[in-house]
Image (tube, rainbow, N blue to C red):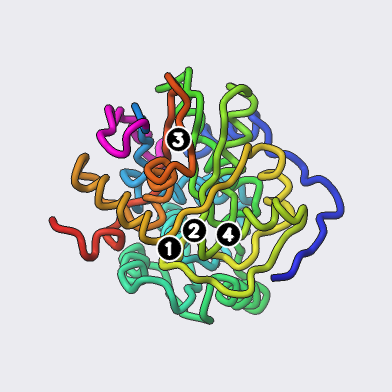
């Protein structure tokens, strides 16, 4: 892996930015529930747990928040040109939905490791789908080239302030439903989600602990924080493809470094086990990446302190975590 130093602190996304994003996306996204999943019977000591269910969000993931926030922050001429992005699936669905709302075309570049079901969902939202490269980073280069070549408006999945602020609206809802939350656990792909949540959480409840979770096979931000630099991974070795860019972005890295208390790693088997538990105990069907937060608790990577109020974000719906589970 290689590291690129961060030359200057990233400009912050503020609570005011997140509150403005909440106003922008009002009426276009759902206010998803926080439910109590308590007590957890296994493993011992995990204790009470609350879940924020973004799998019930329009398009099936939190990504609609950031995409609509970006769309509604754009000048009209930029919207009219049409939208383009690169995605492991969920961000693309958010951008496709935003384009559908505005009545403009959306083009989504996907890497070859994207599940086929995501491409079909994108087409259902009237997006043009292009498969390019092996991983997200390859698809992203193609999307940037298309934006320049075709005059489209590029929407970054995790390094855009308006997108990050949109994702941060999740924290506002959690704090309204669970104002005394002690620990919030968030899965990390490129880092935009945890950066937005961190902006709101640090302003509204600074004493709360914010923990990120990445796959063992894609520890992009974990390694970047350890190195003090933006790290490019040599390879991706996880089936949780929506959590698997080889590289984050200096802007997002700076935000994450300023707000996250730590990042833990979980393997694919632990995520599958957590996905089965969510289905068996709560009837929640989530994709592999969305089970990462519960996996971190069940494996003890995030230790629960006595009496602690813990909320884990289940960030998207799906069934890839349940492929071999009884139903």
Q: Nearer the viewer, mark 1 or mark 4?
A: 4
Q: Which residue is mark 3?
A: 26
Task: Please report whichever mark, 3 or 2, sits nearer to the chain's N-terminal start.
Answer: 3
Q: What residue do we see at 59% from left, 34% from top?
A: 18
Which numbered tag is attached to residue 81?
A: none
Q: What residue do we see at 35% from left, 67% from top?
A: 118
Quadrant position of the N terminus in the picture: bottom right
On screen, residue 301 above or below 114: above
Asked if the magenta segment contains residue 196, the reply would be no
Spatial distance from mark 1 to mark 4, Cα to Cα?
12 Å
Q: Is residue 210 left or right of residue 176?
A: right
Q: Which residue is mark 4?
A: 219
Task: Please report whichever mark, 4 or 3, sits nearer to the chain's N-terminal start.
Answer: 3
Task: Find out whether the residues at labels 4 and 2 contact each other: C-beta distance under 8 Å.
Answer: yes
Task: Please report whichever mark, 1 or 3, sits nearer to the chain's N-terminal start.
Answer: 3
Highlighted range, magenta: 26-45
Q: Which residue is mark 2?
A: 215
Q: Residues within 10 Å of mark 4 (few under 14, many from 20)?
A: many
Q: Which residue is mark 1?
A: 240
The quarter of the displayed image where residue 20 is located: top right
């Amino acid at each position: 892996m290689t590291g690129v130093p961060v030359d200057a602190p990233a400009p912050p996304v503020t609570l005011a930015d997140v509150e403005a994003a909440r106003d922008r996306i009002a009426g276009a996204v759902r206010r998803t529930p926080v439910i109590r999943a308590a007590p957890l019977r296994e493993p011992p000591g995990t204790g009470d747990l609350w879940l924020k269910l973004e799998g019930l969000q329009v398009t099936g993931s939190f990504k609609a928040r950031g995409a609509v926030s970006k769309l509604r922050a754009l000048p009209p001429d930029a919207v009219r040109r049409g939208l383009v992005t690169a995605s492991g699936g969920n961000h693309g669905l958010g951008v496709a939905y935003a384009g559908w709302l505005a009545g403009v075309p959306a083009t989504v570049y996907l890497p070859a490791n994207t599940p086929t079901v995501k491409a079909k969902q994108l087409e259902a939202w009237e997006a043009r789908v292009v498969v390019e490269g092996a991983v997200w980073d390859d698809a992203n280069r193609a999307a940037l080239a298309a934006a320049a070549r075709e005059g489209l408006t590029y929407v970054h999945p995790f390094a855009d302030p308006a997108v990050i602020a949109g994702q941060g609206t999740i924290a506002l809802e959690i704090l309204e439903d669970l104002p005394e939350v002690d620990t919030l656990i968030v899965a990390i792909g490129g880092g935009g989600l945890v950066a937005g949540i961190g902006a709101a959480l640090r302003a509204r409840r600074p004493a709360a602990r914010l923990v990120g979770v990445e796959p063992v096979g894609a520890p992009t931000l974990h390694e970047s924080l350890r190195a003090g630099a933006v790290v490019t991974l040599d390879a991706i070795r996880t089936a949780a493809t929506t959590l698997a860019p080889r590289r984050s972005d200096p802007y997002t890295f700076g935000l994450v470094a300023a707000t996250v208390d730590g990042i833990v790693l979980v393997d694919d088997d632990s995520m599958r086990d957590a996905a089965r538990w969510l289905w068996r105990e709560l009837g929640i069907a989530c994709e592999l990446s969305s089970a990462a937060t519960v996996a971190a608790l069940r494996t003890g990577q995030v230790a629960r302190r006595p009496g602690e109020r813990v909320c884990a974000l289940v960030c998207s719906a799906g069934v890839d975590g349940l492929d071999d589970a009884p139903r």
